[in-house]
Image (cartoon, rainbow, N blue to C red):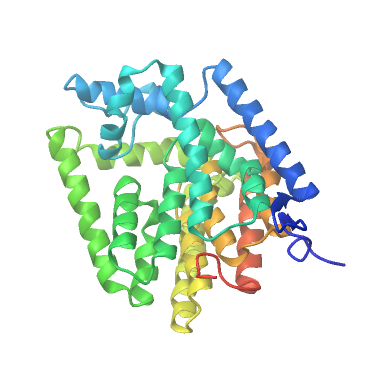
Amino acid sequence: MKSLADAPGAWSETPRRARRLSPFALFLVLVAALWTLAYVGFALSEDILAWDVRYAYSPAAEHVLDGDSPYPALDDPILEDQKGYVYPPQLLFLLVPLTFLPVDVTALLVAGAMLVLVGLTLWILGIRDVRCYAVSLLWMPVASGVLLANVSIPLALAVALVWRYRELVWPPAFALGLAVSAKLLLWPMFVWMLVTRRLRAGVFALGIGLAVTFIAWAAIGFDGLTGYPSLLRRLSEIQSENSYSLVGMAAALGLPDLAGRALTFAVGGALVLACVVLARRGDESRSFTCAVGATLALSPIVWLHYLVLLLVPVAIARPRLSPLWFLPVLLWMSPRPGYAEGYKTFLPALVATAMLAALLARPGAGRLAGEPA
């Protein structure tokens, strides 16, 4: 019995050698398009499309225009409502031009941009199977990233750029430097660069990240800088035990916070160690997969949209459609973006673990995505 990867591809040849979509590919494209239009339209009608831009980023950008601090106080209830801006200030300067537009227009523009970035991520990695593009739109982490319009999808693009241009210096340096400056979540990528002997790119990425962050803080007069670490700690206190992270899963089992953080350190540390060992064996793709997995395991806060990062290692190892591509679709059984609840707290981790196990079991058949054909 043939697998999906061995089945007729997304394209079927005609006698004139023109390409057309196969029936299965056409079905997937139609379902993905209708599903995407449905949830985007519903979210727009309910004023929740591009939630983070609508309720956190844009108000913070307006505060910057008014000369005020974009950061909430530690006791501000908007932190619990997930409406507080908690990123470094450089993101706000990208949104300042959009503050002059009606909020629904901004939401549509940003949500559309997120969908484009998902496609661009796959294209950069060498994915030419249209079925993969369609199934990726059915991923709950992708939909969550579109609905919230936060930095998760751009971070996935940055990770894809790091892999695609890994033999160069400046493209991965800029991609990783800008990504880590926006969210420190991706710091295990520096470990991967170090152990694969891409020291120059890693050093330049660190320098670019520090420079961008310094310039952005300077542009707002370093307003909120001294209290920023406390803000991140406060955010972790509020959200970590209610998220899909290892800390959150431990809390759901009734374990103390210390147990959750110890588990985070153990699992994340094991993935970082595996990244080092595989790199020394010359297995760059699986080493890279471990680095991506470590970014998720080591984060005290994990929401569904964080798992969009797994799109990159899946595309690297499975450049054609396979059953692995469908696993994140199961996450639609999780609650909508918000706090995790009950047994559903464990579902994202189970899906992520199954995907990482499949990717690490073997690199995948054929060429790696992102490699020249």
Q: Is residue 166 above or below residue 279?
A: above
The one of 113 and 210 positioned closer to us in this rendering: 113
Residue lying at the far right of the rendered structure: 1
- Judging depth in this view, the residue of 295 and 323 nearest the camera is 323
Q: Quadrant of the C terminus?
A: bottom right
Count of numbered circles on the image: 0
> In this rendering, would 6 be left or right of 215?
right
Q: Residue at x 44, y 83 (%)?
A: 280
Above or below — where is 234 with respect to 354?
above
- Residue 113 placed where, x, y %? 46, 36
Q: Is residue 333 visible?
A: no
- Residue lying furthest bottom in this view? 281
- The answer to whether residue 294 of the structure is visible from this angle is yes
Q: Residue at x 77, y 58 (%)?
A: 15
Residue 23 is situated, as x and y percent measured from the top left of the image, at: 80, 47
In front here: 163 or 344? 163
Vertical relation: 86 (above or below) 357: above
How far from the left and from the top, in percent, is residue 306?
A: 50, 46
Image coordinates of residue 305 in percent, x first then y, are 53, 42
